[in-house]
Image (tube, rainbow, N blue to C red):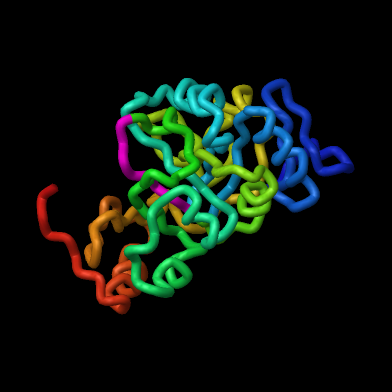
Amino acid sequence: MAWSLDNPDGNVETKKATVSPAAEDYSQEAIEAIRAGKVIAVPTDTLYGFACDACSAEAVNRIYEIKGRKHTSPLAICVGDVHDIKHYAVTDHLPHGLLDCLLPGPVTLVLRRGESSILEKSLNPGLESIGVRVPDCNFIRVIARGSRSAIALTSANLSGQPSSIDIKDFENLWEHCAYVYDGGILPAGRAGSTVVDLTKLGKYKILRPGSAKEETVAILERHSLLEDGTGD
């Protein structure tokens, strides 16, 4: 999409928010906003999302307020690289090479947090698991690396409303963000990431088909994981 009122530096000043291209030139201001406990809107490899420091209870609460979301609905986290996941979740029960085959990509892995997780207990209290993403999107990965923290990430929309593939889809929420980063119209559709539970040894369970179910299942089964058919 194109903006007719673009400033020469690429920013668009509106009454609601500063809209900038989702380009690496703007990553440092995004990192600083995350570190300051603010909420930003970013493109991913699936949908636009609201992002904040997962270790800031105030920022996480702000996301819930913006979305009108119940605190009983958990937030996923995003990290910059696959090797960062072990700091936040238990991965030593997974087959060798599985994570690198699944990620980066449009998949959310649900893993046990474990005792060694450095996540704040205030994030998804009462849950022993955490959804983890490494999107195939350089901009948000640069932000995650630079923030030196996990990024809480959830779709940029009011709870229960359609997901956003264009920043105009959530224009009514821009005013709540420190920055909105425009990556154009995202091509993956509104299905979101495929969510898979990998908390059980040797098993997988698809919790949401999302945009990459077939590819994800093929990778899981190639690594000898079996579908968890229990109703747990």
Measured along the vertical axis of the image, is residue 206 above or below residue 67? below
The part of the image, by quadrant, that contains residue 31 is top right
Taking the spot 31% from the left edge, 41% from the top edge, the residue there is 128
Q: Position of residue 149 (x, y in %)?
A: 59, 43
Q: Position of residue 27 (x, y in %)?
A: 74, 46
Q: Residue furthest right?
A: 8
Q: Residue furthest front?
A: 115
Taking the spot 65% from the left edge, 35% from the top edge, the residue there is 34
Measured along the vertical axis of the image, is residue 93 above or below residue 37? below
Residue 132 falls within the magenta-colored stretch: yes
Which region is colored magenta?
126-133
Taking the spot 73% from the left edge, 31% from the top edge, the residue there is 18
Q: Position of residue 35 (x, y in %)?
A: 67, 34
In the drawing, does residue 225 fall left or right of residue 47?
left
Measured along the vertical axis of the image, is residue 194 above or below residue 64? below
Q: Nearer the viewer, residue 201 or 63?
A: 201
How many numbered marks appear?
0
Q: Position of residue 42 (x, y in %)?
A: 60, 43
Q: Nearer the viewer, residue 163 or 63?
A: 63
Residue 77 falls within the magenta-colored stretch: no
Taking the spot 39% from the left edge, 26% from the top edge, the residue there is 69
Q: Main secondary structure of the magenta part?
A: strand
In the drawing, does residue 127 fall left or right of residue 181?
left
